[in-house]
Image (cartoon, rainbow, N blue to C red):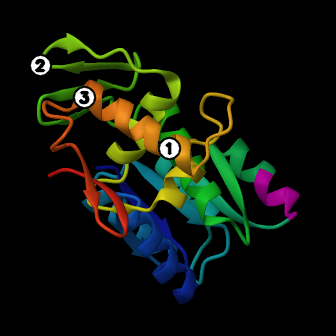
Amino acid sequence: MSKILLVEDDRDIIENLSALLRLEGFQVRSEKGQKEALEAVEEENFDLLLLDVSLRNGNGFSVCSAVKAVSDIPVIFLTASGDEFSVVTGLELGAEDYVSKPFRPRELVSRIRSVLRRCGKSQAVLEIGDLRVDTVRAAVTKNGQDCMLTALEYRLLLVFLNHKGMVLSRSRLLEEIWDAAGEFVNDNTLTVYIKRLREKIETDPQNPAIIRTVRGLGYKLGE
């Protein structure tokens, strides 16, 4: 599970963004100022820093500069919309990306996952039971035997693996996979893809242990 340090002085953003990131499977620690952020980096190992530019004491640029001088922790800046100076300054200091406020939650999560993958901070091999997913090679095996999944089946499996512990509604799944294979996916075809995926990864597809149905709510990755 990737660990994120959120450095932000707006209480509402801290609460809402921390809750979102935890739902997405991240560990989150938040700090409001430059001094506290640098102390946190000394105390713990983080996989990524989310830095606001404006802080009550100090600023995000100073935090980024200090962190980059001693580690390779990737940094994403949160900047005011249209603030070109902050964007350029942050990138020149070594930040991997920036997201403008007000940001769209799903876009931010996507940016975070992308930076973690590029920087080698995301978990390369995911496992559940006898199923093993190598995200670098996009290879899936069960009991050591290859599982040949289509692009959309693979994307669907990754969605479940990236949301452990969460019940995913059908509408949420459709949002996640609709363009994975360059084809339209509707509610009826989603049922077909889940059935096909279960046939390939479940020991007993009629009694699935990996992708479980939560009646009336959606689906959940098995424990």
Magenta-drawn segment: 82-87
Q: Residue at x 15, y 13 (%)?
A: 144
Q: Nearer the viewer, mark 3 or mark 2?
A: 3
Task: Tell me which amino acid carries mark 3.
Answer: Ile
Point out residue 211 in the picture as x, y percentages from the top left corner. Answer: 27, 46
Please name the residue shown 47% across and 34% down the image: 155
How far is disc 3 from disc 2 in space, using C-alphas? Answer: 10 Å
Residue 131, image x, y percentages = 19, 29
Question: Label 2 crowding class (10 Å Cα cut-off): few <14, some 14-19, many 20+?
Answer: few
Q: Which residue carries the number 2 mark?
A: 143
Classified by dominant secondary structure, the portion drawn in magenta counts as helix
Among the two numbered marks 3 and 2 on one chain, the one whose residue lies closer to the N terminus: 2
Q: Does the image show residue 196?
A: yes
Left or right: where 180 falls relative to 139: right
Closer to the camera in the image, 104 or 27: 104
Residue to which mark 1 is pinned = 190
- Would you name the residue on which mark 3 appears? 201
Q: Identity of the amino acid at label 2?
A: Asn
Asked if disc 1 and disc 2 are in contact, CB closer than 8 Å, the reply is no
